Image (cartoon, helix red, strand yellow):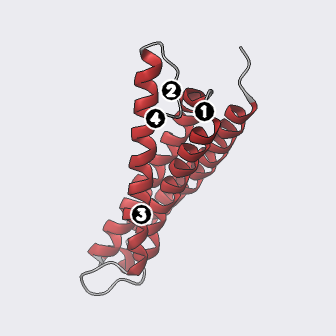
Amino acid sequence: MRDAAHVRVQRARSRRLGWIGLAVWASFGLLLETAHGFKWSSYLDDELLRTLLRLAHAHGVGLSLVLLAHAAVGAELFEQDQARGARVGRALRLGAVLIPLGFALSAPYHSESDPALPIVLVPVGAALLLYALASLAHAARRAGDGREPTAED
């Protein structure tokens, strides 16, 4: 059975951002390994910097994989509700960008013990991510019951 056009669009967007994110954040991880391997003191001597950059790398890679899962199986859960599927896809993609970006951007400019202002992107991204994941879980449960998710759900 052919996907509806809006499902194909959501799949393509999540797949594109997922692969781009995976390439970017995996490369970022390689840069962190390089900094550690060459004993760059500006990286090794700053515990908060290391922690924030590791969090950016880990969340970036993990959330890129979540986007690829959405492209593979999640987008089709909203085949009958184009508007909701688009909202959930946008929230998922935006959350997957904001969370690692918040960690990464707050690392270089942090104070003695606190991350810099861009850390506020993390809870905003987390709220969007949780909304999207809860919507996907609800749609998957409904699909498992043999019912299509509707706008009323």
Residue in the image at 48% along x and 33% along y: 152
What residue does disc 4 label?
A: 136
Q: CA distance from mark 2 to mark 3?
A: 26 Å
Q: Residues within 10 Å of mark 4 (few under 14, many from 20)?
A: many
Give the numbered dot on residue 81.
1
Q: Position of residue 23 (x, y in %)?
A: 59, 50
Q: CA distance from mark 4 to mark 3?
A: 19 Å
Mark 4 residue element: helix
Along the polypeptide, which appears first: circle 1 or circle 2?
1
Q: Residues within 10 Å of mark 2 (few under 14, many from 20)?
A: many
Give the numbered dot on residue 4.
none
Mark 3 residue element: helix
Asked if one can make out residue 66 in the rendered structure from this viewpoint, the answer is yes
Q: Name, please, the residue furthest toward the bottom.
A: 111
Residue in the image at 40% along x and 32% along y: 137
Residue in the image at 43% along x and 50% along y: 129
Given residues 3 and 50, the one toward you in this image is 3
Up-down relation of residue 101 to residue 27 (above or below): below
Q: Amino acid at mark 1?
A: Asp
Along the polypeptide, which appears first: circle 4 or circle 3?
3
Q: Amino acid at mark 2?
A: Pro
Give the numbered dot on residue 149.
2
CB of mark 1 within 8 Å of CB of mark 2?
yes
Mark 1 residue element: loop
> How many numbered marks have been drawn onto this rendered protein structure?
4
What residue does disc 3 label?
A: 124
Residue in the image at 62% along x and 27% along y: 80
